[in-house]
Amino acid sequence: MGTRNSRISGFYQLSPNERLEVVRSFDGLNDEDLRQLHGGNGALTVERADKMIENVIGTFNLPLGIATNFLINGRDVLIPMVVEEPSIVAGASYAAKLVRDGGGFQASSTPPLMIGQVQLVHVADPHRARHDILAQREAILALANRQSSSLVALGGGARDVEVRFFETSPMGPMLVVHLIIDCRDAMGANAINTMAEAVAPLLEEISGGKAYLRILSNLSDRRLARARAIVPAKSLARDGLSGEEVVEGILWAYAFAAVDPYRATTHNKGVLNGIDPVLIATGNDWRAVEAGAHAYAARNGQYTSLTHWERDAQGNLVGTLEMPLAVGVVGGATKVHPAAQAALKLLGVTHAHELAEICVCAGLASNLAAMRALATEGIQRGHMSLHARQIAMAAGAQGAEVDTIAARMVQERRIKLAHAEALLAELRAQNAGTAAAHALATTM
């Protein structure tokens, strides 16, 4: 085994094949893993896709990048990220480098407890029903656990029963029973839903009511992941701004998100910019995590920032992020998609909580990158060059033309499709003239 080091200088300057060779040196991957990450011959075949969802006609590719520089709980990690938006991978990598100056990320997580809900209506005596349901807690748990002997054998399964009473709703009063389920290394949706459906008839019998919804909750607030990062102020100095000035700007950016839901929504989108690409790369349900994250951000009655930033006594910038993160490393697309399996292998994770901790660090890094940009040159400067390349390609530029057209648009601060088309026509006319002159010179 070699030495794993995610601090890779000049990684962005390499070609895709050269980057793949660097990733190869990050222990644990074989040629087949690399082929799946590279997407050669289609990492996901149409035949396999046809077994994953309905009405399949093909597959759809997104860019897979590698975020570098991450040091998490003392371990170097290269993070695969599947995303279409420019600057996310570069921003997370840059932020991870800053955090590395302060010792890297510290991450932790709670046990993988999820909630299954059973809705009971037309309950004649809700308070008596609540008492009776809790009195039969052991029978309810035993019935739930008979639905997933494999989960129980792994140390998981239904752990507890809770009952909530809603006196009013648009349809009238209802009881809601929660099954608290330890999902171990699975995200757990299928097991939770199966258990909720299995216990519903027993709950009807106990309560005298009728069960309607029997389904998991994506507000997985018992299954949290946490990350903490310290950035020395001197590491943030940039473009004539002292580190202390940048810290001040970042703290004002955080304060804005802390009090204003309009800003907090975009602020938290920046957090999820780092998390969603890791979830997609590893075959996890990013919609579920997003839903839980936004609900958690509003848990105290007002939507606010998921992250918290402050300055410590030494003047360092200190950031923390705590949020629900229900992910799995077994079952679902994670087990079916070959590239997802290779991504997990690259991450070096074998348990769901390890993946959740990496995700929350990527989220905190992405948030830091966005706020640092906003507090200094503004978000567009970092986006401009990559966005310009996309516009150049949309205009029809190919090969070296892409970088030439993009550089002109950035220099002229006119990143528009029409301008890219005009520049491309001008460049090709110049090249054609040069080629003609060269041909004439060689025949004289």
Image (tube, rainbow, N blue to C red):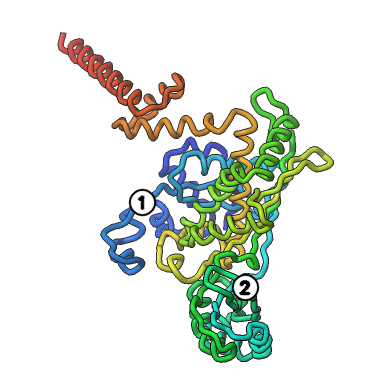
According to the picture, the residue beneath numbered tag 1 turns out to be 61
Frontmost of labels 1 and 2 is 2
**Relative height, residue 86 to residue 79 (above, below):** above
Whichever of labels 1 and 2 marks the residue nearer the N terminus, that label is 1
Where does the C terminus fall, quadrant-wise?
top left
**Relative height, residue 260 to residue 403 (above, below):** below
Please state which of residues 388 and 106 is positioned toward the viewer in this rendering. 388
Where does the N terminus fall, quadrant-wise?
bottom right
Mark pair 1, 2: CA separation: 45 Å
Cβ atoms under marks 1 and 2 closer than 8 Å:
no
Q: Is residue 392 left or right of residue 210?
A: left
The residue under the point 33% across, 64% down is 49
Q: Is residue 23 left or right of residue 228?
A: left
Extreme-right residue of the structure: 313
* Residue 258: x %, y % from top left: 68, 45
The residue under the point 51% across, 51% down is 25
* Residue 248: x %, y % from top left: 73, 33
Please state which of residues 271 and 156 is positioned toward the viewer in this rendering. 271
According to the picture, the residue beneath numbered tag 2 turns out to be 166
Q: Secondary structure at mark 2?
A: strand
Q: Which mark is residue 270?
A: none
**Relative height, residue 169 to residue 91 (above, below):** below
